[in-house]
Image (cartoon, grey):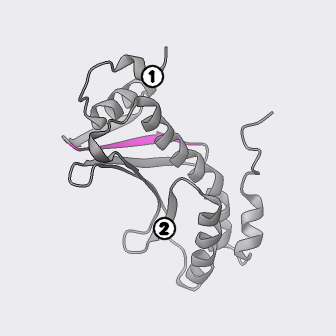
Amino acid sequence: MALSEQFLTDDLHPIDMVEHLAETQDWDFDRIGDDQIAMAVEGQWRTYSVTLAWSPMDETLRLICTFEMEPPEERLPALWEGLNSVNDQCWAGAFSYWDEPKLMVFKYGLVLAGGQMACAEQINTMISTAILASERYYPAFQLMVYTDRSPSDALQVAIAEAYGHA
């Protein structure tokens, strides 16, 4: 059965779908409000904090996936250069570094203008994309900020484009 077949009602709130997905995946989650949910998703490298929020004003479902990173001040230029290179490879979503809370962030927005509804498969893909991108680039970010390797050299450890194929 397709994920969306579980939601055959009209006007189902996208955060309700996220909550159902979190329950079926057995992820820890907290329904922060009617329009926001936060989850902890276990990856290979670490546990990622994933938050989805619905904005009715601009009809966008926003996702942020974060993990802590405290780069030394002198390695920030390498991180900025590396982020540009990584984002050139990401077609759905983008990474940024939030200096004050010391978080690496993957951001993605699903625009549902004109009263469109998100389906469960779209939401699942958003979350999967964020986790897979974080898993793929986590080792490279670590090398960029905690070693003297160049960003281009550090990116060589990112999982190859054939990730997930036999």
Q: Residue pushed farthest bottom?
A: 74
- Quarter of the image for the C terminus: give it: top right
User: Along the polypeptide, which appears first: circle 2 or circle 1?
Assistant: 1
As shown in the figure, which amino acid type bears the numbered disc 2? Ser
Look at 48% across and 67% down and name the residue there. 96
Q: Is residue 63 left or right of residue 32?
A: right
Q: Are marks 2 and 1 in contact (CB under 8 Å)?
A: no
According to the image, label 2 marks what residue? Answer: 96
Q: Nearer the viewer, residue 156 or 144?
A: 156
Q: Nearer the viewer, residue 148 or 124?
A: 124
Look at 54% across and 45% down and name the residue there. 129
Q: Is residue 96 left or right of residue 89?
A: left
According to the image, label 1 marks what residue? Answer: 3
Residue 37 inside the magenta-drawn segment:
yes
In the image, the segment drawn in magenta is 35-43
Q: Residue pushed farthest top?
A: 1
Q: Tell me the quarter of the picture where residue 17 sits.
A: top left
Look at 32% across and 32% down and name the residue there. 19
Q: Position of residue 36 (x, y in %)?
A: 26, 45
